[in-house]
């Protein structure tokens, strides 16, 4: 994707921003008597988007409003989800509750305590701000119970990292800026960080980051690791290594196909095809230095291994481990597992 096409992508709004807008509309109905057709909110960095209110219900002492999430041009699984907020008169400030489709925290290591609804700190802060703003506007005490529901959220959550992070029963209400930036790496890397936090908090000392589901299955079987030890690394090996450098564990396994591990071996920390490529001249030099066949004409790293033999895969694994250890510069024991497309292990370097 070119830089210009990336800049032309339409941004969207986080689940937290949608919930904040729905909170404002529901409070206007509860305290003011009428639902607005739309509301404007101020986001943490000063943007003031307007949200259409498409769901309205109220009763004695409560009101609820709903906003349809628009994630812009980002491939977000929650795009189009209905975010419903019910506000009820309460006591002792603002409290948060998980309705249908919103998860509950069951494991330590996340920024929200075990047993709490999966509503992250920044969305909570934004909604508390709206409660205080509306309370002042309508001359009310800022004592409100907020329940967030996302119809179908439990099913959508199976397509996210939530089950592995110990968030059960539905989705998380996320967002730090309120804005979804299309194809941003930040949400994925943040999820990697939370996965590491949870694994450390429950006492796991051997974690693994793999480039895809096939390599993950091979590594998990090889080392007999629990699901919580398997980080959803994808292409972001740099995100895993930099966070573990500051928050170490005893052992780390990196697994992937020969193509992506070759890019890692050549120093790439982002393994996406749009952001790094295999250097075939360098791969050829490695093969020749190892006494193997020339692979200069290979179109893929897998083809290069087919030409030169399994020794080239071992060479790649060894060099990838060197790159990992250069970044970590720590006492973490590391190993690398290289697989083919079927999940067969081609090479292992390190403790593996």
Image (cartoon, rainbow, N blue to C red):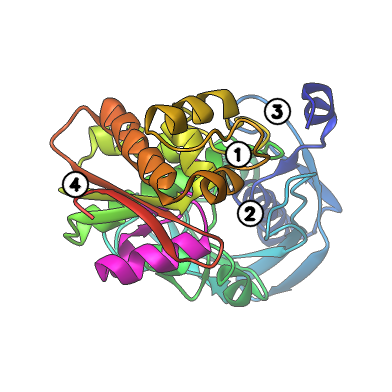
Name the residue beneath numbered marker 4: 249
Name the residue beneath numbered marker 1: 272
Residue at 83% from the left image edge and 62% from the top image edge: 54
**Closer to the N terminus: mark 1 or mark 4?**
4
For the residue pair 124 and 227, the one nearer the viewer reads as 227
Residue 215 drawn above or below residue 252? below
The quarter of the image holding the C terminus is bottom left
For the residue pair 47 and 267, the one nearer the viewer reads as 267
Left or right: residue 182 versus residue 270 is right
Mark 2 or mark 1: which is in front? Answer: 1
For the residue pair 272 and 232, the one nearer the viewer reads as 272
What separation in Å lies between label 1 and label 4 (alpha carbons)? 26 Å
Is residue 235 visible to the viewer in this orientation of the structure?
Answer: no
Q: Residues within 10 Å of mark 1 (few under 14, many from 20)?
A: some
Name the residue beneath numbered marker 2: 19
| Magenta stretch encompasses residue 335 | no
Tags 3 and 1 in contact by the CB under 8 Å rule? no
What separation in Å lies between label 2 and label 3 (alpha carbons)? 16 Å
Residue 34 drawn above or below residue 292? below
């Amino acid at each position: 994707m070119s830089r210009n096409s990336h800049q032309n992508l339409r941004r969207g709004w986080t689940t937290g921003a949608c919930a904040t807008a729905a909170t404002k509309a529901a409070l206007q109905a509860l305290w003011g008597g009428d639902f607005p057709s739309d509301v404007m909110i101020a986001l943490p960095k000063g943007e003031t988007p307007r949200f259409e209110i498409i769901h309205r219900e109220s009763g004695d002492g409560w009101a609820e409003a709903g906003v349809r999430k628009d994630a812009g041009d980002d491939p977000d699984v929650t795009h189009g989800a209905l975010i419903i907020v019910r506000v009820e008169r309460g006591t002792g400030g603002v409290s948060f509750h998980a309705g249908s489709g919103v998860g509950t925290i069951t494991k330590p290591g996340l920024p929200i305590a075990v047993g709490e609804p999966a509503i992250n700190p920044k969305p909570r802060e934004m909604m508390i701000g709206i409660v205080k703003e509306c309370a002042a506007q309508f001359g009310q005490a800022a004592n409100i119970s907020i329940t967030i529901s996302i119809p179908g959220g439990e099913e959508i959550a199976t397509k996210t990292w939530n089950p592995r992070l110990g968030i059960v029963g539905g989705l998380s209400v996320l967002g730090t800026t309120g804005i979804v930036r299309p194809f941003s790496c930040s949400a994925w890397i943040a999820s990697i960080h939370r996965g590491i936090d949870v694994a450390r908090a429950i006492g796991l000392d051997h974690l693994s980051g793999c480039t895809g589901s096939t390599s993950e299955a091979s590594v998990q079987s090889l080392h007999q690791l629990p699901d919580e030890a398997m980080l959803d690394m994808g292409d972001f090996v740099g995100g895993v290594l930099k966070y573990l450098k500051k928050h170490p564990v005893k052992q780390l396994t990196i697994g992937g196909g020969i193509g992506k591990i070759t890019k890692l071996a050549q120093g790439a920390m982002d393994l996406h095809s749009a952001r790094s490529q295999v250097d075939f001249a360098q791969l050829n030099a490695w093969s020749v230095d190892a006494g193997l066949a020339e692979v200069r004409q290979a179109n893929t790293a897998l083809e290069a291994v087919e030409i030169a033999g399994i020794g080239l895969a071992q060479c790649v694994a060894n060099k990838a481990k060197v790159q990992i250890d250069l970044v970590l510069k720590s006492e973490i024991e590391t190993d690398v597992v290289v697989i083919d497309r079927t999940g067969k292990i081609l090479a292992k370097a390190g403790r593996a």
